[in-house]
Amino acid sequence: MEALLTALGDEVQDVDEETFHLFSQAAALPDLGMIDPTIDSLELSIAGRDFTITQSPGALQSTRKEGTTGAAVWQTSVRVAEWLASPNNVLFATGLLDESSTVLELGSGISGLVPCVLAAKVGAVVATDQQHVLKTMRDNITANVLHPASRSPKHTRRKPNRSREQPASNINVVALDWEEDDIEKVLVAQGFTEGVDVIVACDCIYNYALLKPLMQTCVDICTLRRQQQQQQGRDDRMDQRPTVCVMAQQLRQADVFEEWLQTAMRWFRVWRVPDVELTGVLRSGSGFAVHICVSRSADGSG
């Protein structure tokens, strides 16, 4: 953990300053960030690996109350997947993640790109989204995970449950509604009784109404690990490692970003990943940013 924080450099201290810094140099992209929402099948190449993603163009026209953003492939997910796949990725280089780690993605969408990339590098991945997204996500993960892994996730007391509907890999596909579900019950039901090592969220910061539910979900996931450690009286260094949140987003609206950061900083210490630790498509001026959040409760500062 110390190695990661050293690599990240200065902590974000001022919401207005961070917002101005990012949006004064953000590139204006010609669209909302969808790759191509009009086609049924999308071909992508990430870190030398080819992916075929089935989309749901018709679902984007749906009026369902749960929303339709998960029905297409977004630039942020592709760029973050490339970053995570890079050989010198800071999360792996500093030891935060390794082949025994457990990662949970919020709002994975239909593509499951980030889980597919991470599956070859960590012990277990939990891909989450709302129920109506899961069938296509499962199909895409099954089609694109070429080498199912058999490693056991770290900090998991028993093998995670996998129904016959789950892809044949170390990826668990799980329904999760930030506003409705009890995250502890969801994770415990999947066998992740001691939480996860890292939370990843790609382009989940776009709607004022979802900012607090999103960050409350992150708080609840982080709290699960801390509670388990306290209940079991653990004091060794590894077991004190907190869950870390990786929040990646396309910089669209300064007001939405500002409110998200204000909300996040109530519960978390926040760092922006510096350009030197990012791939080119995520660096300053790209129109994207990646932040790392660590619970204030984890170090006694909140």
Image (cartoon, helix red, strand yellow):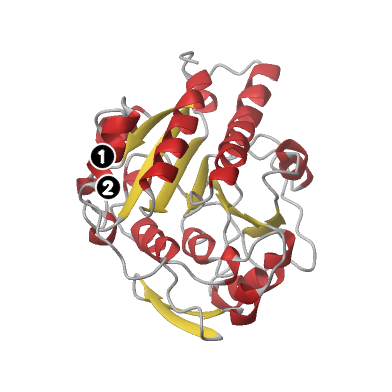
Q: Position of residue 238 (x, y in %)?
A: 50, 27
Residue 41 at x, y = what percent?
A: 53, 85
Q: Residues within 10 Å of mark 1 (few under 14, many from 20)?
A: few
Q: Position of residue 107 (x, y in %)?
A: 58, 55
Answer with left or right where residue 226 lies relative to residue 122.
right
Residue ID for mark 2: 23
Tell me, yes or no, whether the two marked residues, 2 and 1, touch with CB atoms within 8 Å: yes
Instruction: Name the quadrant of the N terminus.
Output: top left
Q: Secondary structure at mark 1?
A: helix
Image mark for residue 20? 1
Q: Is residue 237 visible?
A: no
Q: How many marks?
A: 2
Q: CA distance from mark 2 to mark 1?
A: 5 Å
The residue under the point 48% across, 21% down is 296
Please give left or right for residue 190 compared with residue 91 in the image. Answer: right
Q: Secondary structure at mark 2?
A: helix
- Residue that appears at 72% across and 50% down: 160
Q: Residue 82, located in which quarter of the rendered image?
A: bottom left
